[in-house]
Structures are given as C-alpha cells and as structure tokens.
Image (cartoon, coloured by chain):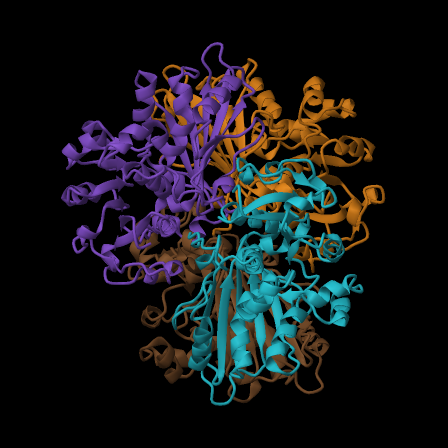
Chain colours: A purple, B orange, C brown, D cyan
C-alpha cells in the first residue's frame, strides 16, 4: 500500500465506513490516508472496530483536522443533511463518492419534501451523478461527485430498469416488498436496533413513506418516460447483512416472464457484478454475503400476465461501500472491478 | 388433569405436536391420554422433546396401537396425504381436529391438481368444516371433523375476508408477500432447514405455486362471490417462529384505508384472539410469539387508492396448534378461549 | 383480576418488568395496580411494549406519583444503586421483592468494593433475605424484603450449593463458564447490545470482575463453612433469552460424578422448578425458554476425579421475574407455584 | 487462473469444501482443476452451492473418475474413516492436505480407541505432519501429507502451546470450555443441526469425550514433556461460523498473567495470522469472521495464580480451509500468506 490512489473515508466509525475500510485494505491500487470519525477523533480505529487492528491504518481524525493534501478521493459515509455542508467545504482537488442521500435527488423540491429542509448545496447537486455504474458508467468517469444509490434503490433499480425501459412491464403497477438486515440502519443507538428487539422476529417499517421511494421513482421515471409511482414496503429481518427485494409486476400485453428474463440477461450478460440466475433458482441473500454481486431471478406469477422479480445484494457492499469503490474505480481511471472480486461468504 | 376431555395428539414428535402438548398440558379441562409418533413408538416423549420431561405424559405409541377407548378428541398433526387414510380408520366416537391440508379443499379436482393424487376419503371431506373459528363458529360446534387452515391462510384470511366480503377492495388485485420462520417447514430432515442454510439470510420459495394458494383462493372466492386469483410469494426468515403477511390491496372506488381499518375493527371488536392495532403501529411477529393472537395493521399506500394490510401470527399457535385447540374447544362445548390465553413471550 | 393481591411493578419498561407483567397477567390471584417507568410516565404500557396492549393495564406512572394505597406488594426492577433509595422511601405496608443487586450482599464492605459507593440503606439490608426459594423458603415467608438473586447466581447456586454443602467437591477449585442471552443486559441503549454487534458471534466479558461473583461467593461460603473464591467467565451469545452455566468441579476424595448426581437429585426431588436430568442428557436453554424451570445435568470429566455440572435457566424467568413471583407467592401466603407453570416454548 | 498450481478439492459439497473453493478462487497462484462430490457427480457445483455460480469451475466428479493428471495438490475434505482409504489410493505425485482426523493421531492405539476401528493406512500415518504451521513450518515444507488440525485444536493449541512449553502454566490443570458455530458440524442431515433446534439456544455436547481431545493432548504432551490430560467441554451456539475457546489455567509458581501475555506476544510477534490482543480487549468471533486470523487475549483471573486465555478463530478458515491453504502454500513453495489475507467481515 505504498503507492497508488490516496483514499479518505469520512465517517469511518459506522458500518458503511468499516466495510469500505475492509475492502480498501485489500484494494491493490489504493492506500488509506485519512479516516474521520468526529466523536472518536484521536483514537486508533481498532478502538472502535477491533477487527481492523494490525493493518497500520491512520488514526481517526475530525473532518476539520484532516490533511486533504494527502488525499485524492474521499468515500463519504456521513449522515444525511450534514453531508452536503461538509462536501461543499472539501478542497476542489478531491473527488467525492458520497454514500448519503444528499445528492441523489435531482429535484430540490422533492429533496425538501422528503428530508424536511431546503438543500444547502444546490450547485453541487447539479454536478452530481447518480452512481449506479451499470447505467451511468460514462458519466461517472467524468464527474467529480457521485451520489451512490441507497441500498434498496440499488437492488430495485437493477431488477427493474431494463424491463421498465423496454416497456415489458406496466410502470404504474409495480409493487415492491423489501427485506433488509439490520446493518442497513447503521450503528446509531436506537432501541429498535437492539438485539432483543430484532432477534427472532420481523416487522415492516416506513410503509408508504420510506426515503428511498423518491429515489426509485426518479430513476424509473427517467427510463419510463412518464411519472412513475411505486408501492414500497420494507421489512426488518433478524440478520445483520443482506437485502432481498421482491418486485411484483404486471407484464405489458404480449410480454411473458421469459421476456423479462431475457431482457435482464441481455442487459447484464457482460456485467461483472450482476447475474440473472436460471429459471427456478431462488436468489438468497446468503449467496452474495460480503460480495459486490447482485443476483436477479424472474418467476411467472400464477396470476396470468404477472411476474415476480427477485433481486438480492449485500446492503453494505453492492448496496453501499462496494458500489462506492466501483464508482471510485471508474472516476479514477482504474479497472471497475479492482478490489471487488470477493466470493460470497457462505455460510 | 384427572378429569375432563381426553385428548390424543397424532404426530406428537413434530413441532406442531409439541406445541399442542405444550398448550394442552396447561388446558384446565383436558388430559392427554394418547400421543402417537410411529417412528418413536415405545419411547417416552422426552426422548424426543426433552423439554416435555416431568409432566407424566403417556409414552409414544403408533397410531395402530393407540387405545381409542381412552380418547374423546384427536388433534391430528400427520403429513399431508397419509392423514386422510388414517382419519378414515379412526373410530366414529372420536372428534377430529386435523392440522394437515387433507380436508381443507372442498373441490376434489383442486385437491388432485395441487397434491398430485385423487383424494382418498371424499365422504369425510364432505363433512369437514374449514376451521377458521372467527368465521365458522357455529358450523365448527356441530361437526365431527375440522380442517384447520394452514398457517399462511390463517394470517391472510383474517386480514382480508372482512374487506373482500364488504367489497372494500378489488378481489382481483391482491398481492401477498409472506414471511415465515423455519418451524413452518416442520422437523423433517431437509438440507434447506439446516441452521447454516437459513441463518443470516433470506430467500423466497414456492413462488406462484405454494400449496396454501388454493386454500386462500377458495375462501376469498367464497366471500367475494366471484373466482379470486391471488399473487402469493412466501419467504423463509432466520427465525424459528412467527409469520408476517403483507397484503397489498387496491381499494374499491370511494373506499379509503380508514374504511378498511374500520371494517376490520368492527369485525374483530369482540374477538378474543384478533386485534386491529391503532394507526401507525406496525405489528411484529414478536408481539404474538407463543400466543394465539393475530394482530392486524392497515396502512395507506403512497400510491393513491391502494393500501397495505399487515397481519402477524405465531405460525405454531394461531397458525396451527393454538387454533386447533380453539376449534377443539368449540367442538367439545368448552369456552373458546380455554387454555389459550398465554401472553406473548417478548423478547 | 378483580380480587386478590394488588401488585406494583417498578421499572415496567425494562425486559424484566415486561416479563413480570407477562406472568402476572395470568397469575390467578393477583392484579396489577401500579406500573412505573419514570421516563415514560403518562403513557400506556403498550406505547413501550406493544405486545402488552389490550389487557386493561394501568398507565405508566413515576415512582413518586404512584398510589401505594392500591398496592400490597411491589416487584422492583430498577437499576442498581437507585433502588436502595427508592425502596427506603416506600410505605411500610408494602412487601418488596427486589430484582436489583442492592440488597444481595450482606457485607457492606463487599458491596462498596464492587459497586463503588457506600450502601445507603443499611438498615434495610439487615432485613433482606437472599431469595433463592429452594434454600430460604421459611425466611422468605417471614420477611418484608427479598433480594432476588442475579440470573447467573441463580443458575450457579442451584447447581453447586448441594454438592458444596455436602462436601462432595473441593470448594476452592470451582471454575465456572457462563453463557447468556442478550436480555440479561437489559434494554438500555448500549452499542454492545445492538443486533449487528451481537449477531453471528460471541465473546467473553467481565472476566474475573463480573458483579455476580461476590454474590456467588457469599452464598457458597455460607454452605462451605470456609471462604470460597470462584473463577467465573461469562460470555454473550447471539440469542435473546437463556443462560447456561458450565461448572467444572474437582470431587472430594472418594466421591464420584454419580454421587454428585445423587445429591442433586435428592435435593430437588420434590422441588417444583428444579430438575436433575438423567445421565447423558445435555440441558439446553431452549428446554426452559419462557418457563420458571432450572435443569441440571452432571457429567464425569475425562480427567479423573473431576466433573462438569451444567445448569440452564431462562434468565428473565427463573433468573429474574419468575423467581420474583415465586418469592412473592411465598411472602404473601400463596402456593409457591401459582402462576408459574408455563411449559417451555420450544422451538 | 490459467497458470500456477493445479488444485483438487475432494468433498466439495461440504461447508469445508465450499470455503476452500471460495478462497482458492481468489488465490493468485492456483487454479481449481478437480472438484469431487460423489453424491453429486456430474452436476455443476452451483447446483449444490448457488453462490459459486459464474466462476467457470469444473463440474463435480467422483473421486474414482477424477483425472489426477490435471492436479498437483489436493485438499481433502472427506469424512473421517473413509479418508485414509482414499488417500492411500491417490497417485504418488499428488501432495495431500487432509482436513479429516485420519492422520492427526500418531499413536495407532489412540486412533483405534477414539475412532472405533484400526487405522487402515498406517504407513501413510508415519509420514503425515500435524499441520499447525506456526509450529511445524519446516516439516510441512518437506512432506507430501499434512494432517490439518481440527478446528478446536487449532484454537486451543495456538493459545496454549507457548505457555505450556515455557512451563508458565501447570499442564495438568487446564480446563477448556469451547463455543462453536454450527458449521463445525458440517452439512450432514442431522436433526440436531436444524435451524429450529439450534436457534435462540445453546447446549454442551460431547462432554469429556469429544474426538478433538486426544489431538489436543497429543500436542500438549509433546511440548510439556509429560503426559497431559485436559478437561474439554464444547458448546453449540446459534451462529454459523466462529469458535471461541476459553482456557482456564493455573500459573506456575512466580508466573503472572502478564508473563503469559508476554510469552504469547513473543511467540506470535512475526506471525501473519496470529495476534495477541492488548490487555482488556476481549476477542470476539466476529473479529475474525471469514478471515484466517486467530486472536488471543489473556486475563488475570480473580482467583490468585490463575488466568483465562481466550482464543477465537473462524472454524471454517483458520480452523479448516484457510489453514489447509496455508499448509498447501508451504508444501508447494508459495509464500505462506498467499490468498489468505481477507479482512474479517464485520458485522
């Protein structure tokens, strides 16, 4: 790690930050030069994450104290709302891969509606690219600021963009049920995330009002050519990692489930991280645990003319830090898959 | 336990059987006189379930060797297919609460289609009552044979019957996603149910072809007055008990989510085991763990004219053995709630 | 619940409090008249624990606002340290079953050493009975204040008191390893108790300095007739409930593992809640989940002259609220087992 | 993967086999040329492990049908007992890294006592090296057959060999408690490994008679210079991966816990995979999940002159397939750490 891209991770004391560090430690063309965690500034990172001891990582610092002259690109895993102000203050030479929601929504009114305040860095928003690499590679390569999709939007959009764009399904009749492990909620101290609250049980949350909805609708609207409204119901599951999205769709007249499968297979035939599984195989979150892969399966519904599309990712990798590194690779001229070829940890 | 109803449990070495025994041991008006488990005949039940040691239970026997003169009513937790033949051979004086699928489907052609063979006890099928007590109390009281609903159908039908029946939702546009703990799959040795296969992950199964579908459609068709086809996608979760059903519905013109809530609240206002939770509360499976309750919540979808109805049960209690005892109480003239008032075990 | 003993639960918003309420709701001779939770005063309890909705429970109140004229006995599940001051202020007519550590240690110096401050209610301490009912029944019946043992001490002492007292094992060579579910740590917001920190992993904590050690040593010293020092290493497991204690002992000259088994079997032959399992059966925490039972197994070690004694309890029941109710029954002249005969929830 | 060492994995349908494949797929100097799984011969490996789809792996074959001319070294993950016969039939040019217990015990009488039959390949046993690389590097480099230690022995021996060898602890007073995830039991169909049997609970097993005991005793005896008998009690935990060993030791006169720590730190100062954590840090299995690391912590016991040594590994990596690859690297002249530098997956 003595040469190559110099990377900073902002918000290194969260799960997203830790997973970015895990991956970057083995990225052959990077070295970690700055790790920030305001509350823990001054400590070694293993005081916060003991599993990161022994790798010679820099001590945690505040964002304000970071030495940006030692950094080429930052992965920013800070909370929504504060991110925009911090990114606005970063030196111009830094490329920014942002993991928050701050730069995902192109319409300031939509941002304000869902996040409860006016956006405070609209000029930056104008430059930001929505970083789903499979659909925005060229633009990602040329920008300074990438807004990484949320974990749910990643799994939803990879499954739906090709079949909505190709008019194989009715864009106004998409009903999405999503299942997530608890790490999606971060490491903050909330009673709802205690082991005893989550263990051996499940419940839905944010029904009809989850903040990932406008992001999904923005992108589907873009490819549908008409305003799309989705139904989206997320559930919390007793597991740490993993996200499974079950999208129920109505096919366009004449289209079959096989057509959906074929369109997805065509789209992702050469993609390194997205695979369409054979008919009859049910994608499981454990098939992608710890890896940057997304698996997609298509099933004909018993109700004629309808189908079920299932997509799975590891929310912390393809749904967060892995995708961020994929974007970083693109932005910095590295091969897209560098450092991201972990095989899933099963079991 | 020296007086009262004499109860036999057939298939006592499965999870359903064990939970029936758990509940019946504390049922004040019953005593367990026969426990069958063909593979374990001759053993004490604690050789199979150590937690049932010390209660003076009868030894396990085969169905053939059981002394039916000591039994008034049987709870039958045997596998699908063999159940019909065994029930046909039981003495006439026995009341039968069947937990298998054998007597749930009224149309023999539907049975043959989904179970792969002709029904072998059609005369019994004619007498069987589909035992969802909240909707069939009077008929249950008067029959000798109750077919207990499957676990998924119980949670689905309690949530949907009132609103389909009252024409508050479009019966042809119901999309159901279901989440289940692993005990729903029983105690049989299948690789898919090993801890390492299920832990820290989730996947869908039986998509578009789960055997609980015809049962749900039969009952919804009954109240809709037209043939109903549902979409139904079950998922396996890393937990032992609990079932959560998310039903996405389209409201009839003019109807609101509040109307759905009101119809459900009206229906279940006096029910001992079904509760409609206040707006904004998300029912969790942990809220009903170990209890015979079903909780139902109604949420307006963000897409106009649609709603999400969520219902939770413990699949082994209200979804199986608890409901069986509820039916047994009705059939045998006991107060319906006797022995079934456990408070949920939380956490 | 219109007659009988009037019970207050102090600290009803914790897991211990919730489990006390679960059990008392079905206790045939009690009714809950006061529930305190200072931070949540004014709310219904189902705002804190939705699974307790619908039982007609009194609203949460502060300790200061509680109407003690409506209460005969309190179960006190408040934090260590503050408990002693609050109990000291309670009216004299109240019997008190305390679940904290405040009144467990008879020697004020030991209390001060382990809890970091002088005890502030020493006169009450003098009256307190250490409430392990199997060994203090008569004294519990006659006192006003019972200090319920900690969860670990309960499982340890039930396994060891008879064999230490009968001089079957060397009291100075007891090495204890303990495994606990997360609910033992309560519902407080600590990062260490987040699902993602605990799931799919285990670690030891409080090695050589857990606060349950002096309590265990106090009681073993009492029966050994000499000062006993133990080795005690607790571990946190990815489960909500359950506690397993593995005690490694050296037998006295001439004594065998069978002698240990026989002594325990003799001690607990008539006990309603403690069972010694047959040779070869390994007690599992799932065998006692949700119940007030303790199971004990004895195994000869391969190293000559040594043995392994394993005991399991549900930490929230026999290790906490169940044992508190057992004590309450004794103090109030009710049959000891009233309301405590739940069969374990398995799986 | 077009050049380099050609590797075969025997028993590729088990968890050990799958983890070997996971690691070897990213090993820069290897390619997988043979995968055997007799029961699944003819299938692609993703029919057994869907997460291994898309990597261009060879189809599964039987051991008899394997083309050994395409293989330089085999990792053998076959069942105990059959392994010795199969290894005996392998061509001489193959190097063999065996993961079974067949070649671990040097004394044929001990083997026969613990495994119930005479060893059937004693000549091979003579050549086998017990493959704990940290203590047998040179011999491993020069042998054709390595017997990888069991998962428990790996964690136990790394913690204890230095302090037993240096006479810092009494070798006759070691009491070991071990905690393991379920994958240690393999993928075989046993009721005991079903999710519902293991979830939300724990129990001990094989108390005083686990087959890893003679292996531990053999190696400790070797360094102690006197026959060592240990006490060893393993427990099953509700997690898939991870092993934690708590070794309680009595220090030699004059030795302190700090001395133990120092000896371990000295031993492992330059080791790539073994780390002694600072005082006060409690090693957790989640700190090594998916990685080849072993962490060791030392804690003074409260009982004078005694200490607790805690070691953690991932049982499928350092406890199995990772260590096998470490041995393979040594045997084949590759840098020992090649392909084994995964950072732990946390959470």
| Residue drawn 49% across the image and 46% down it | D26
Residue B178 is situated, as x and y percent measured from the top left of the image, at 51, 33
Residue B259 in picture, x, y percent from top left? 39, 24
- Residue D52, given in percent of the width and then of the height, sits at 55, 40
Q: Residue A273: x, y in percent? A: 43, 35
Q: C2 or B23, which is in the foreground? A: B23
Q: Is residue D201 above or below residue A274?
A: below
Q: Is residue C325 left or right of residue B15?
A: left
Q: Is residue A295 left or right of residue B258?
A: right
The front one of B315 and A211 is A211
D36 or A134: nearer the eye? D36
- Can residue C336 be seen by looking at this rendering? no
**Residue at far right of view:** B65
Q: Is residue D55 above or below residue D161?
A: above
Left or right: where C10 falls relative to A37: right
Which residue is nearer to you in this view: B335 or C150?
C150
D155 versus D50 height, above or below? below
């Amino acid at each position: 790690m003595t040469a190559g891209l110099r990377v900073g991770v902002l918000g290194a004391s969260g799960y997203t930050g830790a997973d970015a560090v895990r991956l970057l430690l083995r990225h052959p063309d990077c070295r970690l030069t700055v790790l920030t965690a305001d509350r823990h500034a001054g400590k070694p990172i293993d005081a916060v994450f003991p599993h990161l001891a022994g790798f010679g990582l820099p001590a945690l610092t505040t964002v304000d104290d970071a030495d940006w002259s030692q950094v080429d690109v930052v992965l920013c895993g800070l909370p929504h709302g504060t991110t925009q102000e911090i990114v606005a203050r970063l030196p111009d030479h830094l490329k920014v891969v942002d993991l928050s929601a701050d730069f995902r929504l192109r319409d300031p009114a939509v941002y304000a509606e869902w996040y409860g305040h006016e956006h405070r860095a609209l000029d930056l928003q104008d430059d930001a690219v929505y970083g789903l690499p499979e659909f925005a590679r060229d633009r990602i390569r040329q920008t300074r600021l990438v807004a990484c999709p949320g974990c749910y939007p990643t799994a939803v959009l990879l499954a739906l963009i090709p079949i909505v764009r190709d008019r194989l399904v009715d864009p106004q009749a998409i009903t999405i049920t999503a299942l997530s492990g608890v790490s999606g909620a971060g490491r903050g101290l909330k009673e709802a995330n205690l082991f005893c609250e989550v263990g051996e049980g499940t419940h839905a949350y944010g029904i009809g009002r989850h903040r990932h909805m406008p992001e999904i609708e923005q992108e589907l609207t873009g490819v549908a050519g008409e305003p799309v409204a989705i139904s989206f119901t997320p559930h919390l599951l007793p597991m740490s990692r993993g996200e499974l999205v079950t999208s129920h769709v109505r096919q366009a007249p004449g289209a079959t489930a096989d057509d959906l499968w074929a369109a997805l297979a065509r789209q992702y035939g050469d993609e390194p991280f997205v695979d369409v599984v054979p008919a009859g195989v049910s994608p499981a979150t454990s098939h992608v645990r710890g890896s940057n892969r997304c698996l997609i399966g298509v099933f004909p519904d018993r109700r004629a003319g309808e189908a079920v599309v299932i997509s799975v990712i590891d929310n912390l990798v393809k749904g967060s830090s892995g995708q961020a590194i994929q974007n970083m690779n693109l932005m910095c001229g590295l091969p897209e898959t560098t450092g991201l070829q972990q095989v899933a940890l099963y079991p």
